[in-house]
Amino acid sequence: MMALAVLGALGAFALSEDSPAESTILPEIWVIGDSIGVGIASAMVRANMPHVSRAIISTTARQWLTVLRAPDYGSWPQGKRLVVVSLGTNDAQSVELRREFISNALAIVAELRARGHVVCWVLPPSASSLIPQPGDFDRLLEAGATPLWTRVPMADTWHPTATGYDELAAAIEHLRRNPA
């Protein structure tokens, strides 16, 4: 069973002080997704974390699935990476996109896992509206994604504060150093 990382404003996510073997630490983090992904990448810059950001404001799971299936995706750096996916807030704003979110999310996880990547999905505050059927969340876990809930200080309905983004970045760095 995959570990579920839950972040809280009071530091409910305890980071291990253990130092993992260097061979288990993933070399860098890729961030793909929407405006929350952009914020996460900014926090990674502040924390001097090794990352490549491909996040684009206002994107959806459908759009990213198209990108990942494009022929030039194969030209991205090869090798095992921690891929942080931050998608869902824009999908929640459309009935059509909300309906297809789980199938798109599962396909994204499958595309990334097939390339050997470790996948962390940052679930938006609106996740409950995106996962309409009992068992859908379990399907995302079974597909191999580690969910990271955005239960951090929020600036607005969708976006964390700078402190919230820093907390997410710290949790993601922990996952990079201790991949499942």
Image (cartoon, rainbow, N blue to C red):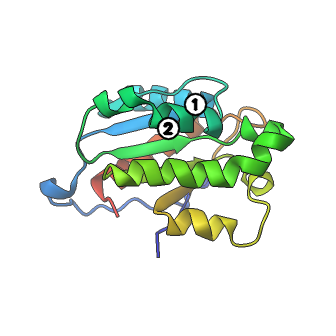
| Quadrant in the picture for residue 137 | bottom right
The residue under label 2 is: 166
Outermost residue toward the top in this view: 57
Kind of residue indicated by mark 2: Asp
Please state if 97 lies on the left or on the right of 107 as rendered. right
**Residue that numbered label 1 is attached to:** 162
How far, Cα to Cα, is label 1 from label 2?
6 Å
Which residue corresponds to the image point at 78% horizontal and 50% vertical from the top-left?
Answer: 99
Name the residue type under label 1. Ala
Any part of residue 40 in sight:
no
Looking at the rendered structure, the secondary structure element under dot 1 is helix
> Is residue 56 found left or right of 177 in the rendered image?
right
Q: Residue at x 59, y 40 (%)?
A: 164
Asked if residue 21 is positioned above or below residue 166 in the image, the reply reads below
Q: Residues within 10 Å of mark 1 (few under 14, many from 20)?
A: some
Q: Nearer the viewer, residue 136 or 36?
A: 136
Image x and y of residue 149, in percent: 61, 54
**Residue 130 coordinates in the image, percent (x, y):** 75, 52
Left or right of 130 in this view: 86:
left
Q: Which mark is residue 33?
A: none
Q: Secondary structure at mark 2?
A: helix
| Residue in the image at 57% along x and 31% along y | 162
Comparing 180 with 11, the one in front is: 180
Residue at x 76%, y 41% (from the top left corner): 97
